[in-house]
Each structure stands twice: as C-alpha cells, then as structure tokens.
Amino acid sequence: AAGVIQSPRHLIKEKRETATLKCYPIPRHDTVYWYQQGPGQDPQFLISFYEKMQSDKGSIPDRFSAQQFSDYHSELNMSSLELGDSALYFCASSTWTGEGSYNEQFFGPGTRLTVL
Amino acid sequence: AQSVTQPDIHITVSEGASLELRCNYSYGATPYLFWYVQSPGQGLQLLLKYFSGDTLVQGIKGFEAEFKRSQSSFNLRKPSVHWSDAAEYFCAVGSTGNQFYFGTGTSLTVIP
C-alpha cells in the first residue's frame, strides 16, 4: 500500500539559510499534519491543513510557514534557520472527519534536518 | 485538554524477560490509542492501536496492549523481550477533530 512520502530524507543547512520540506500524502487523503521531533524529544505538532486551508496550528515558529496544494501535497518552508531547528520533521496524512470522530494519521518516514 | 503520560522515562530489562510499558491518558470521551516504536534516527512504526471493541489489542512483533477505561491506561506488554526491541516507545492519543498527542516516550534497553 502507498505510504506518506517525504523529501528530502536528509537535509543539511547553514544557520540563517532557508529550507523547504515536502510531503506527499497517501492517495485520497485530504489532510496533512507536520510534526517536529527534537533530539530526545517526543514529536510536537506544528500545523495541519485540510483542503488547502490551515485547519489547526500548534507550536510552529513564525519563521516557518506551510501550505497545501491542490494535489494535496504540502510544503514546510523554514527561514532564518537556527541551530535549534535541527530535528526530525514528520509529515502525516489522513482523511478529514471534523468534530465528532477521528481518522487515523499515517506517518511518513521523516526528514532529518541538520543546521550547522 | 487531552494529555498522555508515560511515567517511565527509561526501562532496562534482560533479554527473554517480560516487559510492560505504562501509558496513562487524560481525555473526556472514548480515546483512540496508539503505541509507536522508534529506533535511533528512524521514523515511527505503528505497533498497535485501539479504537473500540475488544480491550486487549494484539500488535506486531509480539506486542499487545490492554485498554482499561477505569484506570485511563493503555499499557504495552510483551511476554519475552528480544534484543532488537531496544528502542524508544511512544504512546499517543487521537481525539475527535483529528487532534493527536504523543507521550514523552519510554526508552527501552535490553541487556543480553
């Protein structure tokens, strides 16, 4: 079965540079979520999108932005990178149910970002 | 607000011994519960999940978990641990509106 695809899998950047992470959801999934997992930490929710609109927002820094495109893939744009941005970034996808129910999120393999 | 607590930051067991990892959740309605395993530098692998029905859930790699509503717990168990089980284990809860929360994780070390 098709899974969530993330690219690139590894990314090395210098401080103050920009980075773009891409996420391709499972076919027919219309909702995408981004998580950040720092070293030794649990994954923290950043932001989610449904039908190209932001559906929820977590602890995403102002230096980061994200969007979802008409083909449902999503990109996380990170500017003015800091050493503390080094982390594993997960994307997950699901179908949307709104309030009252829950649909499982399926996680991608993650993009490991290293900021030097 | 929903939350997930994993009381044990780190557990060490001998190979062949039984294992139980604790997870407690705080959620008003019926929770959707998950256990993930993560090897160093790797992604999250789903071990098992509970949505409804039988409260004893079987997962991959010989793991099982039991949902106990009265104790707000979803503990993960394995009767005989293998060295390859050494990893970080995350309990997570999903709620209506597609919210999802991870616990802080339990690091498992397996002694030969």
Image: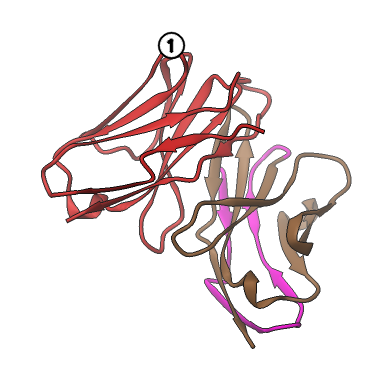
Residue bounds of the magenta highlight: B1-30
Q: Position of residue B84 (x, y in %)?
A: 63, 72
Q: Quadrant of residue B59?
A: bottom right
Classify residue B52 as left or right of residue A70.
Answer: right
Whole-percent x, y for residue A100 in the image: 67, 23
Judge by depth and name the residue closer to the eye, A114 or A78.
A114
- Figure quadrant of the C terminus of chain B: bottom right
At a point 62% along the width and 39% down the height, the residue shown is B94
Report whether B73 appears left or right of A75.
right
Q: Position of residue B89 (x, y in %)?
A: 58, 62
The answer to whether any part of residue A67 appears in the image is: yes
Seen from the viewer's position, the closer of residues A9 and B11 is A9
Look at label 1 and name its amino acid: Ser
Q: Residue at x 64, y 70 (%)?
A: B85
User: Residue drawn 67% across and 40% down?
Assistant: B28
Query: Farthest left residue?
Result: A16
Residue B55 placed where, x, y %? Answer: 85, 50
Residue at 55%, 51% (x, y): give it.
B44
Q: Which chain is red?
A: A
Extreme top residue here? A70
The residue labelled by disc 1 is A70
Instruction: Assign a secondary structure to mark 1.
Output: loop
* Residue B1 in sight here: no
Callout 1 environment at 10 Å: few (<14), some (14 to 19), or many (20+)? few
Seen in the picture, residue A46 relative to B20 is either above or below; the reply is: above
